[in-house]
């Protein structure tokens, strides 16, 4: 396809049926500040390589869909101001303008599927925001999970979202919610949210088997794999909950809306937790990269 540009490493891996893990780029351009964004992106790639898989960081650069970025391209996304946050609805406009876009979970899933990549590691997915009944703020990530065939490894969703409503939406959309070694739907910074997953699977092999079976059945839509933050990196539940309340209230007071909402809340949390949220965020992303690589490695054996 004329718009899709795959790195040599990724296209060889696809041809040889090697394990591949997709990575998003909104986390680089809008999730962390420089230089933490660059370090985090590079460490994720290293963790995936160390686990025997090939990382494929995804973005739109100069109007091309890039699957597998060079070091310079990752650095460009980490250091350039004003890169657009790219979900499904932004794709055609950014490409036609030969622009740059940092792909969200939604955009990354689209391009991973186009490229033939089945496993994707991220931090947390977007979801139904608190007060969505008046704001209508529901992430395009959920609709993407409903229609695009990629397994997304995440640490659940954070409390800037309404977790029970997010889970209801996923149920309606037909998205299986699988816990890796947990009964609890994880809460990003903490291992438990008070809500349950649909299936608790004890091994990455068992999870890969669900992904494999879903492909064999030609079912539409993604699979959400929930991997709790490592115990030693978990934040105190009451501490982070209180900070989230403060951040959400400030976003309401300032009238923050639309695609600005999630980046605003993340930056605010980083600020008011004196960086504790950033440390936890990195730990859970790395943990997801590793588990995604293991799932991808099991998958290519099936
Ligand atoms: N959650 C995080 N970090 C992130 C995001 C979510 O902890 O960087 C990003 C992801 O790219 C996700 C997007 O797909 O935010 C969701 O944005 P929105 O809520 O505007 O759909
Ligand atoms: Mn939104």
Image (spheres, helix red, strand yellow):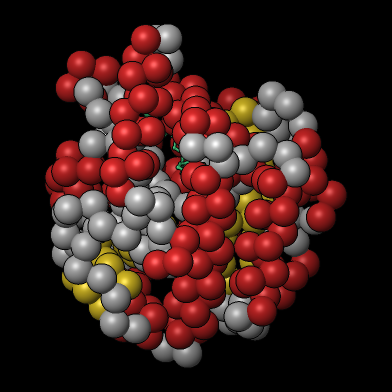
At a point 68% along the width and 62% down the height, the residue shown is: 43
Q: Is residue 147 left or right of residue 16?
A: left
Q: Is residue 229 left or right of residue 294?
A: left
When the figure is inspected, residue 19 is found, relative to residue 28, above or below; the finding is below
Q: Of residues 170 and 62, which is closer to you in this image?
A: 170
When the figure is inspected, residue 202 is found, relative to residue 120, above or below; the finding is below
Q: Where the C terminus falls, by quadrant?
A: bottom left
Q: Is residue 294 left or right of residue 257?
A: right
At a point 54% along the width and 31% down the height, the residue shown is: 271
At a point 67% along the width and 75% down the height, the residue shown is: 49
Q: Is residue 163 left or right of residue 53?
A: left
Number of numbered discs on residues:
0
When the figure is inspected, residue 269 is found, relative to residue 205, above or below; the finding is above
User: Residue 207, percent across and down?
Assistant: 33, 77
User: Residue 141, percent across and down?
Assistant: 38, 42
When the figure is inspected, residue 183 is found, relative to residue 257, above or below; the finding is below
At a point 36% along the width and 41% down the height, the residue shown is: 240
Toward which corner of the image does residue 130 lie, by quadrant? top left
């Amino acid at each position: 396809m004329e718009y899709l540009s795959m790195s040599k490493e990724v296209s060889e891996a696809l041809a040889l049926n090697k394990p591949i893990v997709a990575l998003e780029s909104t986390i680089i351009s809008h999730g962390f500040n420089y230089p933490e964004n660059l370090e985090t992106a590079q460490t994720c790639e290293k963790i995936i390589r160390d686990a025997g898989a090939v990382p494929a960081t995804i973005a739109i650069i100069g109007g091309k869909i890039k699957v597998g970025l060079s070091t310079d391209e990752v650095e460009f996304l980490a250091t350039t101001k004003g890169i657009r946050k790219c979900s499904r609805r932004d794709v055609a406009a950014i490409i036609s303008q030969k622009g740059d876009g940092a792909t969200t979970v939604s955009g990354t899933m689209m391009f991973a599927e186009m490229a033939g990549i089945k496993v994707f590691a991220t931090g947390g997915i977007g979801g139904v925001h608190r007060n969505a009944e008046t704001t209508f703020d529901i992430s395009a990530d959920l609709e993407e999970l409903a229609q695009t065939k990629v397994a997304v490894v995440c640490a659940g969703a954070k409390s800037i979202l309404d977790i029970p409503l997010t889970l209801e939406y996923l149920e309606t959309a037909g998205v299986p919610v699988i816990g890796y070694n947990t009964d609890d739907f994880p809460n990003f910074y903490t291992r438990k949210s008070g809500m349950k997953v649909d299936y608790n699977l004890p091994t990455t092999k068992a999870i890969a088997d669900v992904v494999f079976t879903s492909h064999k059945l030609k079912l539409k839509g993604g699979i959400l794999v929930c991997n709790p933050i490592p115990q030693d990196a978990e934040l105190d539940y009451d501490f982070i909950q209180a900070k989230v309340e403060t951040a959400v209230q400030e976003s309401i007071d300032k009238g923050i809306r639309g695609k600005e909402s999630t980046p605003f809340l993340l930056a605010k949390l980083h600020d008011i937790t004196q960086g504790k949220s950033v440390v936890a965020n990195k730990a859970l992303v790395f943990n997801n990269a590793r588990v995604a690589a293991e799932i991808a490695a099991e998958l290519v054996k099936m």
